[in-house]
Amino acid sequence: MEISQVKGVVSNETPPTHNNRSRGAGGAHGPSVDIHEAVSKGNIEAVKQHIEAGTDVNSALRGVAKYGQKEIAELLIANGANVNTKDSSGRTL
């Protein structure tokens, strides 16, 4: 079995646990990297895939502040992320 076949099998066997990760390897199937991981690593292409897939980007904004990803912050805000979003403890950025 080729590596591309293995990736397809693995990514399609495990359903996503929340709306921050879609099945597949990008493109029409959605991003293959969790949005929070993409933010922490500065993976702007994966963040763009999440935006295109309709992922809720508000929770990713906190990670942007933590990891200092200015370009990703601007992208998230330009695509509707709410800078006044509060976490479960009522804290904003």
Image: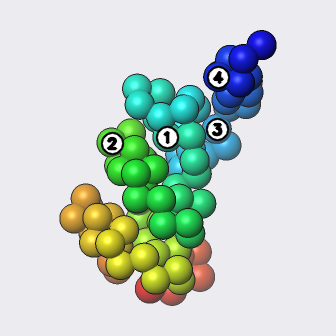
Q: Calculate the distance from the C-alpha at mark 4 to the C-alpha at mark 3.
A: 20 Å
Foreground label between 1 and 3: 1
Residue 9 seen in render: no
**In the image, 89: left or right of 69?**
right
Residue at the front extreme, as displayed: 2
Q: Residues within 10 Å of mark 4 (few under 14, many from 20)?
A: few
First in sequence: mark 3 vs mark 2: 3
Q: Calculate the distance from the C-alpha at mark 1 to the C-alpha at mark 4.
A: 16 Å
Q: Residues within 10 Å of mark 1 (few under 14, many from 20)?
A: many
- Eyeballing the image, is 51 above or below 65? above
Q: Calculate the distance from the C-alpha at mark 1 to the C-alpha at mark 3.
A: 11 Å
Residue 91 seen in render: yes
- For mark 4, give the secondary structure: helix
Foreground label between 1 and 4: 4
The amino acid type found where label 3 is placed reads Pro
Foreground label between 4 and 3: 4
- Eyeballing the image, is 42 above or below 64? above
Residue tagged 4? 4
- For mark 1, give the secondary structure: loop
Colour pattern of the rendering: rainbow
Q: Calculate the distance from the C-alpha at mark 3 to the C-alpha at mark 2.
A: 17 Å
Residue 84 coordinates in the image, percent (x, y):
34, 80
First in sequence: mark 1 vs mark 2: 1
